[in-house]
Image (cartoon, grey):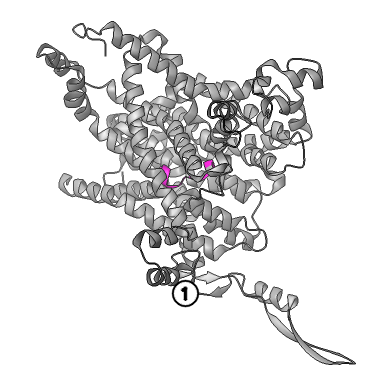
Amino acid sequence: MEYGLDKRSNALKTFNTTFIIIWLLIACFPFIWTFWGSFKVRADFFSRADWWYAISAFNTLLETGGQFTSKAYSEAWTEGEFWKASRNTIIVTVFVVSISLFLGTLGAYALSRSTERYAFWILIAALIFRAMPHITLVSGYLFPFFELQIWGILPTTIVVLVAINQPFTLWLLYSFFKTVPKELDESALIDGCSYFQAFRYIIMPVMWPGVITAGLFSLMLAYNDFTVTALLLNQENHTMVPKIQSYLGTNQHEGNLMWAVSAVVSATAPLFMLVMFFQRQVISGLTTGAVKG
Amino acid sequence: MPNKTFFWFFLPTGLAMILFIGLPIISTGIQSFYAQHDQVVKEVKKCDPFGCTVSIVVDQEATSILRDEKPLGKFNGFGTYVDRNHLAIEQISDFWKETDSFGEFINQVTNLPFYKALLFTLTYCLFVTPNVLLLGFIIALSLNAISRKIRGPLIFGTILPMIVTPLVGSLVLFWMIDAEGIIGANLQLMMEDPYLSLKSSRTLTWITIIIYGIWHHSPFAFVVFYAALQTVPQEPVEAAIIDGASRYQRIRHIVLPHIYPVVTFVALISLMDNFRVFEPIIGFSAEGSAQSLSWLIYDNLVNEEVILFGSAAATSMMTIIGIAILLAPVLIRTWKEFRTAR
């Protein structure tokens, strides 16, 4: 909103800038600090004696002879088996994103093109499902999964995450499909296409922005999930987030807390890069859901 | 679209939602009426030269057979719902009779696990949601006034707290606020109190988790408000400026009414998300002084000896009822709009 008429006083401008700077500090500094600290030894980053050690690297110099050390990273990735956790995360994320996009686009397209009353009720039901705390669903899964002996393995978790993700994906893609004019597929139908052909060859090619946004959100859900992965996977199959929590729990190891710090940085870095790259899509996703839903 | 085509298009996603969201809710409901088996005991008669003694021991074999036969446990009806760890009807009526003042009664009741968790969950919702709306709106307004050229990176920085998972977000803050972290250590220095720490006081823990909640959720409110601000029409604002409206008046009477539907949307979503607060409690290792409903369920499910399915399910059902109460006004309004639209 830059109005020709709207004259801002200098005091207001300064105040505004200061506020933004303070807020950005609050929002970003914790991450910068953790990134910085992950290259120190534990005695520096969690210093009882003097917090300035984290900057001057007093103990890091003593223990390793350098200002920075990547010891925590190499240990967490090898000894801590973080490589396994990240491999599992990649498997889970790839499958969850592709399956939920496949199911979601089909379902949302049908919802957006239906004029029946039940389409409205399905959307409301999806909204209610969206509100369910994941932990209550997990408490429903555990017992049947134990009985069926499908607990602890990756495919179960993938299917569960896809299902949990569907309500949001449906709403998001539904509002995107609504913006694609009906005339487009209607003319294809008149020309003799089936509904599926119209969907596949006419609608999908113009839907890429929406699909990318929905994909990003599925990715963030699968990548960030703690509740489902921590309770439905066994130790061997843990993804990154429950792995980080397991580093916190076991305190026998001196280095374990630093493993957690380096694991947090390793897990967050790819996510930040992804969001930096797709920032526009993330924001459009959050707002289409809001303005139209 | 004909019904048949709709059916085939919607079948995969519908099936996924029914199987993995609908059925689990029913499964939770059934489980909540069962409780884990008691251990089977048997009397063992032991005789020695001085006479015979009868002792009671746990019959491991019979217990495990019983568990295998009926894995769901024994039927308990509403027993789990009213026991000490849930609604605690009996205890509450006892407290009512025994305590002298109302304050003491409330104090006793909020020491029961379920009410303790409910109190924390509601306090968290009550403090986080309005502050998230307010902070998000202020950030959106002030970023909107900044030159378009540098807005991109600023928005990226602003949404960082939102895109990390709550566990990581709370850990990152916890490592700074903890007694050995940069903020915690400096606070100790400033207050000249070497024992000041997050874990030492319940109030401090609650405040920290609430601050975390505001930090984590504000970016979401910001993004939605920021997008809504882009759609505010220019003419009424300019007219208001000509008429001499102050900046506050313009926001109050033109901008706010325009983005009002979005405000209710953000309030609803953030209320829903705040009601399931759980990961920060683990991240801040605050189990001792702050427990939420979701945390209670998690605690039952990771129980070492035997998983307390029934107890977890009962808490889950009550959480779902809580969510239903939160959602009811919105659903009723949507229903009315739908009726009038037809």
The residue lying at 78 percent from left, 32 percent from top is A78
Check the image and report above or below for B184 versus B298.
above
How many dots with numbers? 1
**Residue B238 % position (x, y):** 15, 13
Q: Quadrant of residue A191?
A: top left
State whether residue A254 appears in this view: yes
Nearer to me, B62 or A67: A67
Quadrant the N terminus of chain A occupies: top left
Nearer to me, B276 or B328: B276
Quadrant the C terminus of chain A occupies: top left
**Residue B148 % position (x, y):** 36, 10
Check the image and report above or below for B17 versus A88.
below
A72 relative to B156 in the view: left or right = right
The residue lying at 33 percent from left, 24 percent from top is B138
Q: Residues within 10 Å of mark 1 (few under 14, many from 20)?
A: few
Instruction: Verify whether residue A261 appears in magenta.
Output: no
Callout 1, which amino acid? Gly
Name the residue at the right extreme: B49
Label 1 SS: loop
**Which span is picked out in magenta?**
B273-280
Could you tell me what secondary structure mostly forms the magenta stretch? Answer: helix
- Read off the residue under disc 1: B77
Give the letter of the chain under mark 1.
B
The residue lying at 33 percent from left, 18 percent from top is B142
Instruction: Verify whether residue B277 appears in magenta.
Output: yes
Check the image and report above or below for A247 versus A126.
above
**Residue B226 % position (x, y):** 33, 23
**Residue B5 % position (x, y):** 37, 46
